[in-house]
Amino acid sequence: MSDSASVPDGIKCLPWPEQFQALAKHTKAPVLKAFYEAGCVAPDTPVCDVPMVALDFETTGLESEAHSIVSIGLVPFTLDAILLSQAKHWIVRPKLPLHQMSVTFHGITHADIEKAPDLSDILEEVFASLNGRIPVVHFRHIERPFLDVALQYRLNEGIRFPLVDTMAIEAHLHPDRQPSFFKRLIGEKPVSIRLSDSRKRYGLPHYAAHNALIDAIATAELLQAQIQHHFSPQTPIGDLWL
Amino acid sequence: MQAELIDIRNHLIQHAPFDDMPEELVNQLTESIEISYVRAGTQITETGQISTRMYYVRSGAVEIFRRSGELYNRIGEGEIFGQFGLLMRGQVRFPARALEDSLLYSIPAETFHHLFENDENFADFVEIEDRSRLRSAVSRREKSNALMTSRVSRLISRKTVSAPTTVRLQEAARIMTDQGVSALLLMDEECGDKCDSDRLTGIITDKDLRTRAVTEALPSETPISEIMTEGLITIRASSYVFEAMLTMLHNNVHHLPVIDGEEVRGVIALADIVRYESQSSLYLVSNIFHQQHVKGLKKISLDVRDSFVRMVNEDANSHMIGSAMAGIGRSFTQRLLELGEEKLGPPPVPYCFMALGSMARDEQLVVTDQDNAMILDDSFVPEEHDPYFLELAKFVSDGLAECGYTYCTGDIMATNPKWRQPLKVWRSYFTDWIENPKAQALLNSNIFFDLDGIYGRTEFAEDLKTLICEKASSSQLFLTLMARNALNRTPPLGFFRTFVLEEDGKHQKTFNLKRRGTAPLSDLIRIHALACGSRAQNSFERLKSIGKTKLIMEDDLSNLRDALEFISIVRIRHQALTLEAGGEPDNNVRPEDLSPFERSHLKDAFQVVSNAQKFLRFRYNSQATRHV
């Protein structure tokens, strides 16, 4: 996460619920203030009681400093239910030119983007779904840093929050993903912790489409499966978030 | 609905009852879904719980239990459960447990009731499903038959590969090789500006290339239009897979272009369907056509019964089984005719070989004799040509007997000179039967008016169908007498109280499901069909065309359909059980062999037959007094 210069280290060391309270006072932008005021659950809260939101961005590249967000998909959920009625998807106009390669991957065209709003126009809607929920992503080095940079750019303030990373959970479950030289010789393949490969291990279906919303739903389903297979619904959220 | 939820929506609309649902409702449904992942062994709903939702299995499998703990049903991908409790706005009737790790879409009660009130199809499905699930003796742990619930559109896995009809032989073969397809569609591009898309004109398959091009050593520059098959048989994208299977069986083709309105969506091949059924009856059919001798055919005929039993065990419906068995019988006959012609040389004048009775109606079962006839070209000269046709008819008839289709006791076979006549004689037969409906004429009409040209100049048979269509519908006397005849065989209504059983010595404490059930039904359906000028032969198809004329109320029609299906399937299942037990199947059933469920529903079905007979009597008695 890119550090926003204005947040004092004293605040950054606080446990998340207290840190949110401190940040609520410290922050100026109303949309961020509301986000922190909505609070963060205590680390000992069982994961089954935690309101979560699966979040996925499509971006023009992997570097938060050099690339931009193209689309945002999110779906609020709990361990029991992923609520499609509250699923949201936005296309936003990136500040930086759209790479040809990512165009073919996302299926988002230049025409789509020219009509799209800037992220600042939809921030309130996005935060309406984030407030009070713990974000869940697959691969934590995209959504949090990209959002942080985008907010610094627009509001002059970054954002800090804990999140659950389903890829990190898979990585933890498969510490020896790369087979040894000998095992590779006898044909053993490395364990992939990519979203679609991880889902396969839990018997979750393949989704043909790739867009931020479907990937968010896929991530939420994956977390439900991971918890049921390897953890317990009573697992404290503090053991999972990063 | 968010457009990005399309993946979820697309899965729903591949499965009944969502496949026919108006788009707006499906969208509302999609956005009301709550997804949850359950591990194998998880109890999803428990008896006595308040029902708040219906579930759709996105992946995995779920088992439904009776209150007694007995397994009631298994639900797989694309199927729903939990609707019974919601229908009664009450408690969970059948508890559900995940059999495999499953992803479930749960649908809230309000959405369920909204769909129920706004989509008749959906309402019917969730209610009727109740009955049909009961029907499939569920404790047998069978999956529902995917052939009957999946649409043809699901089988299309790639874009249509086509070429203009002007392409040359070698180019066509190259396209097929490059694209890795076994069939190439040929489009006519000459319709100019008038139409947006090219017109589908023909098809060429791997087999055509072998048999028509390579064996004949055609030059590679031969225009493809010279060897392509025209007059294509196609299937609609919305048809069920089993309908595609029946179409292939009926026409003995291995590729079907799939049409959606005016547009060609793709081609499905035999192999696509066979995947649904491990040992498909389609395999059996294609095997029949590979046999070079009667001996080989006889050997294959031993598999027919297995194929029948398997279809019953896979919960196929009676229409599907009847058509598959008829398709197999038709193929034996066709192959025998081909072998006969090879042996005797080409026919001296054109002819059509005709199937009659149950084979023509696509309602054949395993216990069946042969009913067939020949229509010869009007240029037929008996002294000169008849020895050939007698010889051919004998060859076919003996061959069929070898393959288990016993000789017809009533001698309704092409070997009988009376039933081996030129078209003009057949026209005079049919005209005479309709205009002078004496006892024998009526009996003949019952058999011969279910006809299907299966080999040679099938247009001769079509000509006769047209004649029947035009003449019978306007002949009240004929219809009246046919109706009276049809009332002679009554359903065994008193069966449950007084045991009305057949007094035929061998089967004393039994009743005959064909004579007292399906035959009276198909008789009365035939009369209504003749009266409304339908060309359909199959009883279910006849009911459909009767429906279009409003001759019978829609409700009564569906009752007839259900009754025919139920009696047929009890008859079929009874035969399959006998076969599995190593016995010789027949149409007689002992009341004690029926399950309580079969008894109570047979009673309802017989009641339907009886009411339909009353209607027939009323309709033709009252009209008879006016017209005769």
Image: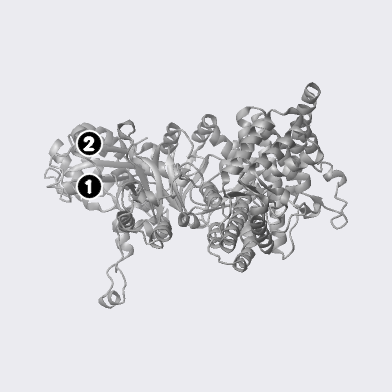
Position of residue B225 measured from the top left corner of the image (x, y, whole percent): 37, 48
> Is B585 positioned to the left or the right of B459 in the image?
right
Crowd rating for badge 1 (residues with CA inside 10 Å; few <14, some 14–19, many 20+) = few
**Which residue is drawn at the image coordinates 64% and 43% (left, top)?**
B423
Badge 2 amino acid: Asp
Position of residue B473 measured from the top left corner of the image (x, y, whole percent): 68, 30
Check the image and name the residue furthest to the top.
B626
Labels 1 and 2 within one chain: yes
- Which of the numbered marks, if any, corresponds to residue A104? 1
Crowd rating for badge 2 (residues with CA inside 10 Å; few <14, some 14–19, many 20+) = few
Q: CA distance from mark 1 to mark 2?
A: 13 Å
**Which residue is drawn at the image coordinates 67% and 44% (left, top)?**
B565
Position of residue B71 measured from the top left corner of the image (x, y, whole percent): 62, 55
Q: How many marks?
A: 2
Badge 1 amino acid: Thr
Position of residue B237 measured from the top left corner of the image (x, y, whole percent): 45, 42
The answer to the question of whether label 1 and label 2 lie on touching residues, with beta carbons closer than 8 A, is: no
SS state under label 1 = helix
Q: Which residue is mark 2?
A: A112
Between A185 and B256, the residue placed more toward the observer is: B256
Between B338 and B1, the residue placed more toward the observer is: B338
Residue B519 shows up from this direction: yes
- The chain letter for the residue carrying disc 1 is A
> Is A165 positioned to the left or the right of B357 in the image?
left
Between A187 and B478, the residue placed more toward the observer is: B478
For residue B90, what is the image quadrant?
top right
Where is the C terminus of chain B found, in terms of image quarters? top right
- The chain letter for the residue carrying disc 2 is A
